Image (spheres, rainbow, N blue to C red):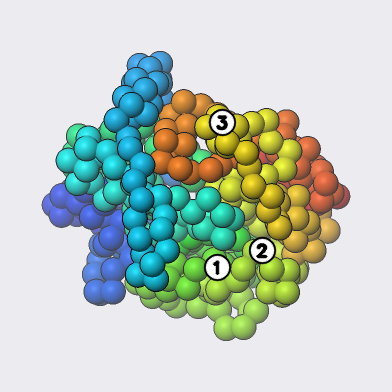
Amino acid sequence: MPPFDHKMTTALLEHRLTPMAAANALYSNEPSDLPAAIVASLSHQIFDSELPKAAGKMKRRLAFLSYRLLKRTTREHIRTDAHGVEYIAYRNRILERSAHPYAMTLLEPSGADSASFVEGGDPMNAPYMMISPEISAHAGLWDKLLLGSVHGRDVQLRFIHETLFTHQIARAKLERGEPVRLKALAAGTGLSMILVFDRLLRDGFDAKLITSTITDRDPANVERTQRLLDQLSTTRDNLATGDGPGICARVEDLMHPATAGANNAHDIITLVGILEYFSGHTCTTAYEKLGEQAPKEDLDAIAIVANINPMLTDSGTLIANSYRAETGARILEIFGKKLFYRDRADLQALVRTANFSPSGIIGSGHVYDVETFTKS
């Protein structure tokens, strides 16, 4: 498989795509050369360029001031849905005047229950687009404030570390002539796994040795993923059938072992951006910060990692992230996002309950640490 033609990435500059426009184009129904160009640009920046730095002191100071300002200017109000059920929504004139789609997602009512933990969808993919210089060059003021914030930059770093670690571990097995099975759990639209699969083929490895599965509980996210798989030559020509080699997207619910444990022989599983929606081995919580009492849930993070254990081969690798109470991340609390903060020590204690041990690969930011664990 030849490497990307860099003319594809320079062509992005001619389209003058903003990050939100790029996220929408990536999962569009319309046949276009843009998805391949966007993936080419992201791939080059992640695999062939220097790792970007986390936000500096000035941006962290700005995050603190933004937190204070948004906390003072955000108001709750009661809405009634089509079924007559009342729920809490949020108003903030500053964000409303921006009319930015990402800002509008903040104002939507929070899914405080664990059934709403999915992070997929076009607005949630927009921070990743800032990784591409051909796209970030056309970012407006609100793109930079929202998508390039302390938290936004850390989301990008988390995504980069997840992608690099998955590729690194998979490549090591392939270089030994061994087949590799990869699985992304609750992956939203699965962009990281798609980048890994594409890169491995461009590295020259045989697609018949690679099995990549992207799962999510939301059928809409799986549908978006399938659109992108159909647009890229490396994925379109290597769609998996059944549990065979290639790449596929399917609906699976991580919270129900009957479906989540259907395929249990994977060498690498990624679980990124999910555990912070579940309690267990946490240093603090959004509930505590807001002066509220956390509700009792039927499922916690300990049950989640227990569900994952049988999905992995012996000595298989789990890639997961911690989540710290950095001010930039705490902005989400203002809009009712009820998250569970877990530092690296908490994360390690959590995964040990399911017989996972740290394997020494770590990527750090201000909010997130991405770490690999080996099933023992």
Q: Residues within 10 Å of mark 1 (few under 14, many from 20)?
A: many
Residue 304 appears in the figure: no
Residue at the image point whose x is 17% and y is 40% from the top? 97
Q: Secondary structure at mark 3?
A: loop
Q: Amino acid at mark 1?
A: Arg
Q: Which residue lies under the disc numbered 3? A: 291
Using the numbered discs, state the Cα–Cα distance from disc 1 to disc 3 in whole angstroms: 31 Å
Q: Nearer the viewer, residue 207 or 74?
A: 74
Q: Position of residue 145 (x, y in %)?
A: 28, 33
Q: Earlier in the sequence, mark 1 or mark 3?
A: 1
Mark 2, residues whose alpha carbon is within 10 Å: few (<14), some, or many (≥20)? some
Expressed as whole percent of the image width and height from the top left, the position of residue 329 reads 47, 33
Identified at 68% across, 74% down, the residue is 259
The percent position of residue 341, horizontal first and vertical second, equals 61, 35
Residue at image position (33%, 66%) is: 27
What residue lies at 48% left-to-right and 43% top-to-bottom? 337
Q: Residue 217 got which mark?
A: 1
Mark 1 or mark 2, earlier in chain: 1
- Labels 1 and 2 touching (C-beta < 8 A): yes
What amino acid type should be assigned to the residue bearing mark 3? Gly
Tell me whether the residue at label 1 lies in contact with that at label 3, contact meaning CB atoms closer than 8 angstroms.
no
Q: Quadrant of the N terminus?
A: bottom left
Res. 189 image quadrant: bottom left
Evaluate whether residue 294 shows in this view: yes
Above or below residue 7? Residue 240 is: below
Q: Earlier in the sequence, mark 3 or mark 2?
A: 2
In the displayed structure, 203 sits above or below 322; it is below
- Residue that label 2 marks: 255
